[in-house]
Image (tube, rainbow, N blue to C red):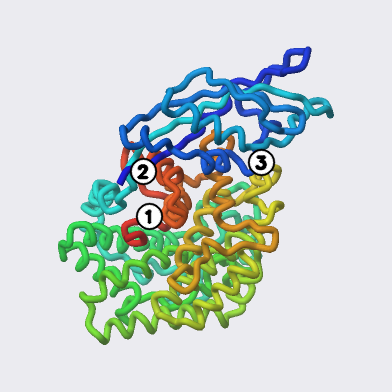
Amino acid sequence: MKKIILCLIGFLLLVSCATTPLEISDNDTKLRMIGGKEALLDAIEYPKYALNKGIEGIVTILAYIDTSGSVLECKIIGGNEFLNEAAICALEKQHFHPYILEGKKRPVRVAIPISFTISKDINIHDFESERVKYYAYHYLNEPVLILTDFPAERSSGTKHEFYSEGKTWWPNPKDPDAAYTIREGFTNPDAFRKHIALLERVGEIIPGLTAVYRITNKNVYAEAGVKHLKAWFIDPETRMEAHMKYAQAIPNRRSGRDVGIYEALSLVEILQSIPYLEKFLTDEEKMSLRSWFKDYSDFLVDDPKGMSIRMRKDTYASAYLLQMCAIARYLDDGFLLESCRDYFRQYSLPHFASYDSPLLNSDLNREFKNNIFLNTDLLALLTHILTDKDYNAWEQTISTGQGVGDIVNYLYSGILNNELKKMGNYDGRFLSLLFAGKAYNNHHYLELWRDLQNGEPKESEFPIRQPVLWIK
């Protein structure tokens, strides 16, 4: 079946209709379409004749927008006779926020190019195959490395317990026994970070091997993944203790902090890998693995660090909830899953989907220290995990009507207009576009996600790297 991709290329030209000429850059934020550009794209119906004949093209419309924001006149300045009418009909239904200049509403003309493209839905298995194999061949030869191989001298725990230190905390050069003090913006090269590097490493290797096993059906990859799985979570001689009590420690001050739970985010995709690997485990090993994650969920629920972090409304709380959701799915714990849904409805969604949230408020998100793309990806993955045949988290909204779809739409429009830039070191694969594209059957999102992935194979800094494990 043919699919359509409709894309706004950008506002090419803005010229004042007033007596005094008005020159505005092509990304002027003072002219805003109500509902975003997605509202226009949704209003366009690809003409059946053009769809059947495979006709594609770009239609550029010069639209006159009056001081109330109404579209009063549309003129084709470049297009296709089979596509022009569909573009005009959709644009005439739109409304803009009035354009304000020096405190006064001004009429404008704007040239809007709309691209009509026929495309096929993305087959994740086929699309990801080359990238997955590229990395899996490397993972196949990686040795098993565990916490006990790298003990931490300053840890309050045993060699089996995860330990890490805050990167910006520094010792007192005059008194080595004094409590460390913070120096924001400066990374202490001697901070102990080996355990987080190991956990992130196994969080790449196990899902990477599992993904290529799913694509190739070659047992050698699954068996290699199981070796790492056993060493970390099953074998009592080598496995990590099921908690994060000593993560993000501050030497001589704090043995661990609640924000350290974020460092276990790699567990989420490991959990997603386990159902594909279970047939290579004995019944006893399966029970031991489930017991480990049950113990870890008890830590998240009952430990003061877990209690503290789930009351936050930020990236750390999202990472906490994401781990809980993944465990609930793996353990088939209906009570825990419903508790996660309640948290999502009462805390996560109201915080991130409100108009003054750091994701939807442009005055905040451009300076938001925790990257908006990362937070949107976390939220989309939460929504994906929470959704099943009895509950659709993608349709959940807050009291003012916004949901996850509105956040992804903002992200999508921002990338499309080149108005939102990646912040920090996050070079993610923007999986929110992929998950939302599949959930809403929105091929604008899917095409944009696909285009972002074209080029050299790359791994994301975000621990969800293998879409083939998540999307059938």
Q: Marks 2 and 3, how far apart in space?
A: 26 Å
Q: Mark 2 — residue?
A: 3
**What label does residue 34 carry, if any?**
3
Q: Nearer the viewer, residue 240 or 168?
A: 240
Q: Residue at x 58, y 68 (%)?
A: 344
Observer able to see residue 206: yes
Label 2 SS: strand
Left or right: residue 149 compared with residue 294: left
Front: mark 3 or 1? 3
Q: Say which amino acid is labelled 2.
A: Lys
Q: Marks 1 and 2, how far apart in space?
A: 26 Å
- In contact (CB < 8 Å): disc 2 and disc 3: no
* Horizontal and vertical percent position of residue 293: 41, 78
Q: Residue at x 47, y 40 (%)?
A: 45
Label 1 SS: loop
Q: Nearer the viewer, residue 33 or 265?
A: 33
* Horizontal and vertical percent position of residue 319: 53, 64
**What label does residue 465 carry, if any?**
1
Q: Say which amino acid is labelled 1.
A: Arg
- Name the residue at the right extreme: 103
Picture quadrant where residue 105 is located: top right
Q: Decide which of tag 3 and tag 1 comes sooner along the chain.
A: 3
Vertical relation: 126 (above or below) 418: below
* Horizontal and vertical percent position of residue 468: 31, 57
Q: Residues within 10 Å of mark 2 (few under 14, many from 20)?
A: few
Observer able to see residue 461: no
Image quarter of the C terminus: bottom left
Q: Say which amino acid is labelled 3.
A: Ile
Q: Decide which of tag 2 and tag 3 comes sooner along the chain.
A: 2
- In contact (CB < 8 Å): disc 1 and disc 2: no
Q: Residue at x 27, y 53 (%)?
A: 125
Q: Residues within 10 Å of mark 1 (few under 14, many from 20)?
A: many
